[in-house]
Image: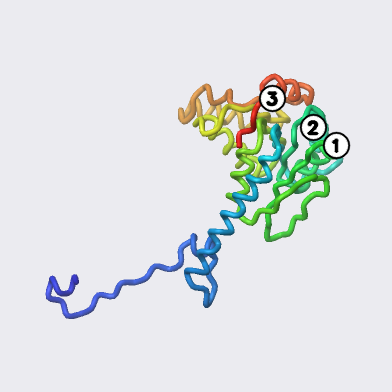
Amino acid sequence: MVGKIFGLKKKVKIHEAPHCRIEDELLDPSKGQDSAVQSWRVFRIMSEFVQGFEMLKKYRLAATFWGSARTNPKDPIYKAAEELAAKLAKKGFTIISGGGGGVMEASNVGAFKVGGNSVGLNIELPVNEPPNPYTTDSFLFHFFFSRKVMLTFASEVYVYFPGGFGTLDEFFEIATLVKTKKISKIPIILYDKAYWEPLLRWFEKDLLKKYKTINKEDLELFYVTDDIEDAYKYILKNVNCNNIRQI
């Protein structure tokens, strides 16, 4: 059409863009695979949401634990996570974790030992990380984002122990959702002041005072403690144990 308008005889060649990330990573095309077959992956995503929600709605009151998968069972952090999970499980909380090792395992161990509900929401990874054996119910996700949605709406309280990128990612996710009122205000516990205080100083010094990218009230979204009994009492004080779950 452009050639006809301007009297051009040479045919304009339109270059096709290379595969984008949604095709390479989400639709995952391979040789001989047409668009219809690719689209069936959408149903796999839908099935993860449906099965995940169906599993979670069985548990009325829950607490989700986050922390490093590398934490050793002899580490005081591991022991602290196990102790707090056991105390909450005795009070009727279902304990939910990412289903792996370290702090996740510790929380499931705590619930398991006292006969409580111990749930693991696992993820398939390139380096296989087997689920810990201390869950009474579990689900294996293929997609990180569908698992993340399940974990986001899973509980009435979120407890964060020292961890890596995954732990920090989930902390910022929950804090953002509470701040924007996408989920109701819930207790967010940050355990181990030595680990969290450098990050909190950055929040106050740079984000709040220097760059003014957050509000003063945002620093009140979470509760920092070094004491399991303190965390336990804070949770019971701020969670209505007769409340219906977020989901």
Task: Give the residue displayed 64% in from the left and 42% down from the top.
Answer: 151
* First in residue order: circle 1 vs circle 3: 1
Q: In which image quadrant can residue 94 be found?
A: top right
Q: Amino acid at mark 3?
A: Asn
Q: Quadrant of the C terminus?
A: top right
Counting from the top left corner in percent of width and height, residue 170 is at 62, 40
Mark 1, secondary structure of its residue: loop
Q: Which mark is residue 242?
A: 3
Disc 2 marks which residue? 89
Residue 95 vs 205, above or below: the answer is below
- Looking at the rendered structure, the kind of residue marked 1 is Gly
The residue nearer to you, when weighing 73 against 177, is 177
Real-space Cα separation, disc 3 to disc 2, in angstroms: 15 Å
- Badge 2 amino acid: Ala
Tell me the mark number nearer the camera, choosing from 3 and 2.
Answer: 3
Q: Which residue is identified by label 1?
A: 115
The answer to which quarter of the image holds residue 44 is bottom right
Q: Are marks 1 and 2 in contact (CB under 8 Å)?
A: yes
